């Protein structure tokens, strides 16, 4: 049998949620200081401007150091953002956790709140202060998902301009040449296929750029790197920008060069014209020369010549890791606001006399110590019964009811259908988007691209500014975060079902946030570390994986900013003029995301198929159902040790404690099922009856708010609260006005090892039902000395 006390500290030294709140506040404060420091350094190195991008690290693109630094920084960003969001989520769940007073107000309105799970409904039913803090924490989390991952990015370098020369081997060895070359084609004579246009008169001017480029090539190309034909074609014909070499000489297999009159039959006037450029009878080792801008390859027909090899000018390609100060500023402001809200929430909630009921154990402790009169007599009510009654379906909630074992019930029944539908609708949408994008990508070339962010992957051809690209690339991160919250919620509910069911299998201490007596301290919040830590690691992995699936691609050098790739693109003022912003996507990474997601969504289904304990009601996170299951007897050994009404080994410790009958449990109403068994008429319905179809509606609902308290008195007011969190306007039960948990006779029981089952009730409880033979039982918590047995099928319990 599993033991609840997996990380317990019975002395309570961990400090419960308050210590965890301090730790999370420290994390947020440290993150704020780090981000502020980075922002100050970045703006100081950027001349005080937050608009311009700061290039803070550079290195040779081919060595891989830039990519390694970028990968390491993004891994750090994912860890930092996960820490910040996790700390924020901690406070959101604490703020989402209702106090006992807020639960009582909800119960008086015949509604309920969620215990131990994130709940949007809870967020707007708690106090206004907690609601606003929750909304602020949520709203400041969104920019972190959308912006932070791209605040730091790597730039690629692709040159587009290069000098193309077609010549013989003698050209680079000092052989004679005459521009524009034996082809008589000036540069750009058929633009754009043959380079950038150049005036023919440039070739007779030794100081022109055209002649200087040709002369420099003839002088230096002999020291350039030799490329074989295949290498040359791969880099220049099939390349996507110049990454390794720039200017190129195509060495033609024609040792003697060309003679003009051997190539051309010119008229006399044409011959006179060209003689000033290319002599008719002299060997010319230059065929053609031009300044090119690479778009999709070399000019058509270039390799129709018999090319012997290529000489390529080595290119120093420098890539950068850059930071956008404006994006970092937006993230920093959100984190600062988040930190301030967290600190304020911690201070206010710590000083509040009404502590939030964060975990299942917190709620059980509160309901055991201070029984809720609104749920008296409903010990057999399941959360599904309460939900159906709220919808107007006639369901017997209070009064004696026959016990029906929960055999063959799975944990899936603990999670409300609405939660299953909402969660898996989100999962289905996310997976459908992945499938759609993958099908689109595979329709072109299924094997094209790499796993990581790379220029070898396909691009989305759309003109983006930096901010537009960042928001578009990171928008799936937001969907992933929403899916993760839903996924975490499923795990939390299933874990609560396990923790609750253990109380029907043996005696266990309560796991609370502020342990006393035999209680033990909570793990972080609701999920055990064996679940929460893997879930956090999976979240980090998926966010990183998604950043490689759709990512920002920024390239300098002019290649992607020119030609057809981003035609008409407007330069981003925060980036250098020759920079292009694009979005790349990896089909391989997307495939892994899809496979991992499909596996993950099956895990809650598998866990939900584990059987529930058949001897306990299904309460889930429903505060009404939990409250109904926690009405205990004053005859319990632990309680009677305080009241002095039971012969118990514990009496000596509490022999001088005051006694009180205020917590004697009284029933509410005889159910139709009980009356039918006893042949009693059905006209004795009490105003406290919750079995009608008007549950939560109309005049009958307001009348049923007059709930008898354990001492037989009534609440001061019968009206519903306005729900605005104003304590002065809400009715307060008598136990809340005159008693605290410190003097409750049930405090000792809540601090002991307890089990849920059939507990012994005082005689007046049975007398109310005319149950002389004590045939009706009560289900609640008791200690080991009470010898609490499980409920019996077919017996009546109230």
Image: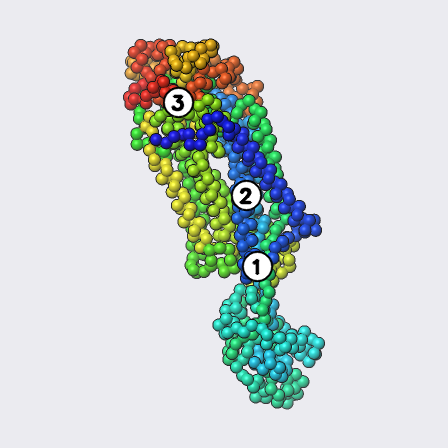
Dots 3 and 2: beta carbons under 8 Å?
no
> Which element is circle 3 on?
strand
Residue 543 place in picture, x, y as percent = 49, 46
Q: Let me know if residue 409 appears in the view.
A: yes
**Residue behind mark 3:** 754
Q: Residue at x 33, y 10 (%)?
A: 770
**Residue behind mark 2:** 81
- Foreground label between 3 and 2: 3
Residue 193 place in picture, x, y as percent = 57, 72
Left or right of 630, for residue 150: right
Where 498 falls versus 144 (above or below)?
Answer: above
Q: Residue at x 42, y 41 (%)?
A: 424
Pointer 1 local density, CA inside 10 Å: few below 14, some 14–19, many at least 20 = many
> Gap between marks 3 and 2, in whole Å?
41 Å
Looking at the image, is mark 2 or mark 1 earlier in the sequence?
A: 2
Looking at the image, is mark 3 or mark 2 earlier in the sequence?
A: 2
Q: Quadrant of the C terminus?
A: top left
Question: Where, by quadrant of the figure, is residue 266 drawn?
Answer: bottom right
Query: Where residue 235 is drawn, which disc sits there?
Result: none
Q: Residue at x 62, y 60 (%)?
A: 578
Residue 426 place in picture, x, y as percent = 45, 42
Looking at the image, is mark 1 or mark 3 earlier in the sequence?
A: 1
Where 596 falls versus 679 (above or below)?
Answer: below
**Residue behind mark 1:** 156
Pointer 2 local density, CA inside 10 Å: few below 14, some 14–19, many at least 20 = many
Q: Let me know if residue 704 appears in the view.
A: no
Pointer 3 local density, CA inside 10 Å: few below 14, some 14–19, many at least 20 = many
> Gap between marks 2 and 1, in whole Å?
25 Å
> Gap between marks 1 and 3, in whole Å?
64 Å
Residue sitting nearer the eye, 636 or 631: 636
Q: Residue at x 61, y 43 (%)?
A: 34
Question: Where, by quadrant of the figure, is residue 768 drawn?
Answer: top left
């Amino acid at each position: 049998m599993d033991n609840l006390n997996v990380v317990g500290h019975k002395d309570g030294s961990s400090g419960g949620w308050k210590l965890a709140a301090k730790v999370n506040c420290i994390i947020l404060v440290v993150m704020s200081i780090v981000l502020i420091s980075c922002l100050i350094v970045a703006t100081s190195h950027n001349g005080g401007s937050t608009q311009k991008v700061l290039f803070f690290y550079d290195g040779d693109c081919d060595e891989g150091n830039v990519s390694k630094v970028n990968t390491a920084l993004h891994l750090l960003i994912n860890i930092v953002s996960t820490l910040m969001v996790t700390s924020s989520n901690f406070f959101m769940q604490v703020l989402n956790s209702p106090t006992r007073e807020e639960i009582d107000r909800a119960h008086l309105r015949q509604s309920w709140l969620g215990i131990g799970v994130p709940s949007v409904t809870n967020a707007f039913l708690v106090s206004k202060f907690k609601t606003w803090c929750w909304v602020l924490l949520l709203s400041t989390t969104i920019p972190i998902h959308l912006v932070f991952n791209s605040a730091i990015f790597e730039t690629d370098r692709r040159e587009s301009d290069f000098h193309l020369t077609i010549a013989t081997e003698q050209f680079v060895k000092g052989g004679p040449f005459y521009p524009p070359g034996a082809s008589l084609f000036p540069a750009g004579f058929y633009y754009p296929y043959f380079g950038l246009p150049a005036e023919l008169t440039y070739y007779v001017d030794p100081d022109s750029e055209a002649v200087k480029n040709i002369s420099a090539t003839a002088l230096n190309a002999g020291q350039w790197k030799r490329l074989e034909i295949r290498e040359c074609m791969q880099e220049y014909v099939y390349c996507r920008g110049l990454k390794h070499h720039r200017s190129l000489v195509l060495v033609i297999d024609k040792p003697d060069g060309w003679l003009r009159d051997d190539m051309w039959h010119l008229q006399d006037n044409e011959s006179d014209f060209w003689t000033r450029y290319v002599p008719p009878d002299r060997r010319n080792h230059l065929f053609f020369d031009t300044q090119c801008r690479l778009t999709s390859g070399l000019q058509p027909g270039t390799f129709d010549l018999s090319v012997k090899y290529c000489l390529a000018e080595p290119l120093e390609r420098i890539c950068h890791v850059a930071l956008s100060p404006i994006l970092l500023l937006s993230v920093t402001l959100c984190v600062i606001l988040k930190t301030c809200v967290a600190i304020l929430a911690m201070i206010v909630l710590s000083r509040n006399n009404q502590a939030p009921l964060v975990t299942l154990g917190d709620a059980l402790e509160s309901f055991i110590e201070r029984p809720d009169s609104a749920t008296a007599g409903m010990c057999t009510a399941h959360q599904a019964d309460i939900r159906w009654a709220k919808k107007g379906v006639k369901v017997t909630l209070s009064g004696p009811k026959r016990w029906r074992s929960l055999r063959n019930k799975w944990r899936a029944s603990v999670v409300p259908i609405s939660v299953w539908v909402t969660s898996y609708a989100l999962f289905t949408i996310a997976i459908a988007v992945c499938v759609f994008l993958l099908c689109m990508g595979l329709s072109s070339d299924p094997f094209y691209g790499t796993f990581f962010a790379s220029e070898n992957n396909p691009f989305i051809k759309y003109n983006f500014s930096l901010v537009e690209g960042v928001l578009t690339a990171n928008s799936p991160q937001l969907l992933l975060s929403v899916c993760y919250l839903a996924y975490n919620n499923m795990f939390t509910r299933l874990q609560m079902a396990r923790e609750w069911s253990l109380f029907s299998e043996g005696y266990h201490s309560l796991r609370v946030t502020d342990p006393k007596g035999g209680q033990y301290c909570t793990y972080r919040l609701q999920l055990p570390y064996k679940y929460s830590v893997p879930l956090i690691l999976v979240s980090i992995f998926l966010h990183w994986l998604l950043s490689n699936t759709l990512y920002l691609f920024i390239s300098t050098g002019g290649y992607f900013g020119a030609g057809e790739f981003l035609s008409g693109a407007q330069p981003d003022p925060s980036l250098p003029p020759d920079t292009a912003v694009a979005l790349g996507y990896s089909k391989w990474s997307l495939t892994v995301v899809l496979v991992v997601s499909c596996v993950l969504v099956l895990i809650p289904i598998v866990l939900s198929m584990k059987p529930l304990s058949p001897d306990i009601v299904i309460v889930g996170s429903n505060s009404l159902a939990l409250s109904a299951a926690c009405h205990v007897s004053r005859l319990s050994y632990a309680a009677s040790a305080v009241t002095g009404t039971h012969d118990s080994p514990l009496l000596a410790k509490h022999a001088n404690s005051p006694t009180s009958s205020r917590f004697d449990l009284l029933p509410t109403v005889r159910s139709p099922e009980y009356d039918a068994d006893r042949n009693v008429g059905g006209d004795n319905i009490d105003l406290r009856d919750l079995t009608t179809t008007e549950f939560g509606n109309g005049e009958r609902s307001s009348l049923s708010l007059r709930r008898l308290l354990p001492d037989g008195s009534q609440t001061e007011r019968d009206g519903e609260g306005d729900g605005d969190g104003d304590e002065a306007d809400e009715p307060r039960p008598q136990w809340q006005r005159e008693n605290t948990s410190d003097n409750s006779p049930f405090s000792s029981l809540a601090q002991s090892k307890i089990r849920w089952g059939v507990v012994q009730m005082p005689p007046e409880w049975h007398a109310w039902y005319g149950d002389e033979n004590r045939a009706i039982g009560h289900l609640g918590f008791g200690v080991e000395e009470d010898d609490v047995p499980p409920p019996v099928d077919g017996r009546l319990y109230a």
